[in-house]
Image: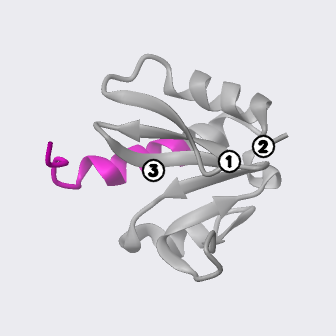
């Protein structure tokens, strides 16, 4: 299994019909983009969330969260959340919201 398919379904449910969201398989997982900017994804059984540098420390205080180190190098502003931190629909929805809120502050991608 490349990534947790049940978690992917839960993310889709949390997103509902949010405008501007696209889904793309990448890096052996799946990611969701808001207006072309990645904000949440799944790597194996963990949720990857782009929380931004200002929320990084607060994110690490939440259950199951750790700094993303996808390339072996810590990436401030990105966190992985283990299944233990995603048990409830509300917890998952909160992470999805944080990711979407952060990328909404970024400038539009150049075409």
For discs 3 and 1, the disc positioned in front in the rendered view:
1
Q: Position of residue 18 (x, y in %)?
A: 39, 23
The residue that appears at 73% across and 46% down in the rendered structure is: 86
Q: Which secondary structure lies at badge 2?
A: loop
What span is colored magenta in the figure?
95-111
Q: Give yes or no for contact between labels 2 and 1 (Cβ–Cβ under 8 Å).
A: yes
Label 3 – label 1 distance at C-alpha: 23 Å
Residue 75 colored in magenta in the image: no
Residue at the image position 44 percent from the left and 50 percent from the top: 99
On the rendered structure, is 68 left or right of 24?
Answer: right
Can you give x and y, in whole percent of width and height, for residue 71 in the image?
61, 74
Q: Height in image: 49 above or below 30?
A: below
Label 2 and label 1: CA atoms lie apart by: 6 Å
Query: Circle 3 — which element?
Result: helix
Residue at which label 2 appears: 2
Report the front residue among 34 and 59: 34
Label whose residue precedes the other's in the sequence (3 or 2): 2
The image quarter containing residue 19 is top left
The residue identified by callout 3 is: 98
Nearest-to-viewer mark from 3 and 2: 2
Numbered label tally:
3
Q: Establish if 10 lies above or below 98.
A: above
Residue 24 location in percent, x, y? Answer: 51, 35
- Dot 1 crowding, Cα within 10 Å, few <14, some 14–19, many 20+: few
Q: Residue at x 80, y 50 (%)?
A: 83
Front-lying residue, 108 or 95: 108
Q: Earlier in the sequence, mark 3 or mark 1?
A: 1
User: Which residue lies most toward the top here?
Assistant: 17
Left or right for 41, reference 108: right
């Amino acid at each position: 299994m490349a990534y947790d398919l049940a978690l992917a379904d839960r993310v889709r449910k949390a997103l509902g019909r949010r405008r501007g969201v696209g889904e793309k398989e990448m890096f052996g997982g799946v990611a969701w983009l808001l207006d072309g900017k990645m904000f949440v994804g799944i790597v194996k059984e963990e949720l990857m969330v782009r929380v931004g540098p200002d929320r990084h420390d607060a994110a690490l205080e939440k259950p199951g969260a750790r700094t993303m180190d996808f390339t072996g190098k810590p990436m401030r502003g990105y966190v992985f959340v283990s299944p233990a931190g995603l048990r409830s629909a509300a917890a998952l929805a909160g992470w999805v919201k944080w990711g979407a809120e952060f990328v909404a502050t970024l400038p539009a991608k150049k075409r």
